[in-house]
Amino acid sequence: MATVDCVNGADDFSSDLIAEYAASSTVSEGERDLPATQRLLRQALARETALRRERDQLLERRAMETKLFVDRDEAAIRVASLSLRQREIMGLILAGHPNKNIAADIGLSQRTVESHRASIMKKMGVTCLAALVRLALAAEGNDETVGN
C-alpha cells in the first residue's frame, strides 16, 4: 500500500486518486477548483494516515499491556511456588546480600544458602541475578509475596 507524506503532500498513489476524483467529479469545468480539491484530498489522506497510525500504535500498546499482565501473573505464580524460607532468602539476595552474610543473618550454613539460591533460580526459571530481579519486580506489581 502506498504511503502518504503528511508534511509535503501526497505520493503517487494519492496523486492518482486526486486525478481520478477530479475526472469523475460532477461539477462543471468552469466551477472546478482543482488546486483546492487536491489540497482537501491531501489533507483528508494525511488525517486518515495519521488516524491509522494512531490506531496501530494503540493496538500494539494493548497487545504489549496484555503480555505484561500475563507475564506478571506468571511471575506471581512462580514466586508463590517458593517456600517461605526460599522467599526470605530471595528477598535478601535481591537486597544485594552475599551468601555468606545471608547465612550468618538467618543462622544457616553458607552451603545451605547456596543450595536454596540454586533452587530459587531453578523454580523461577532464570539463570542470572538480573533476570531474577526482573521477574521479582514483575511479581511485585501483582502480589506482595516477594521479600520478607
Image (cartoon, rainbow, N blue to C red):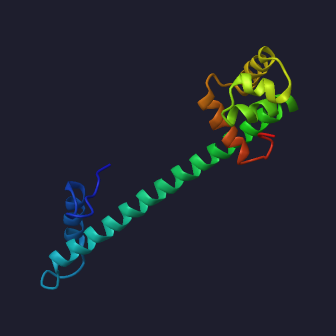
The residue lying at 52 percent from left, 49 percent from top is 60
**Image point (61%, 31%), residue name:** 131
* Residue 137 coordinates in the image, percent (x, y): 67, 42
Q: Toward which corner of the image does residue 87 lie, by quadrant? A: top right
Which residue extends farthest left? 30
Place of residue 61 in the rendered image (x, y in percent of width and height, measured from the top left)? 54, 52
Toward the bottom, the furthest residue is: 31
Q: Nearer the viewer, residue 89 or 25?
A: 89
Q: Which picture quadrant has residue 24?
A: bottom left
Task: Find residue 107 and report its horizontal and vertical position in percent.
Answer: 86, 25
> Which residue is found at the position 78% from the left and 34% from the top?
79
Depth order, front residue of 113/2: 113
* Residue closer to the observer: 41 or 30: 41
Please state if 35 lies on the left or on the right of 44 as rendered. Answer: left
Q: Is residue 96 left or right of residue 92?
A: left
| Quadrant into which the C terminus falls | top right
Q: Is residue 136 visible?
A: yes
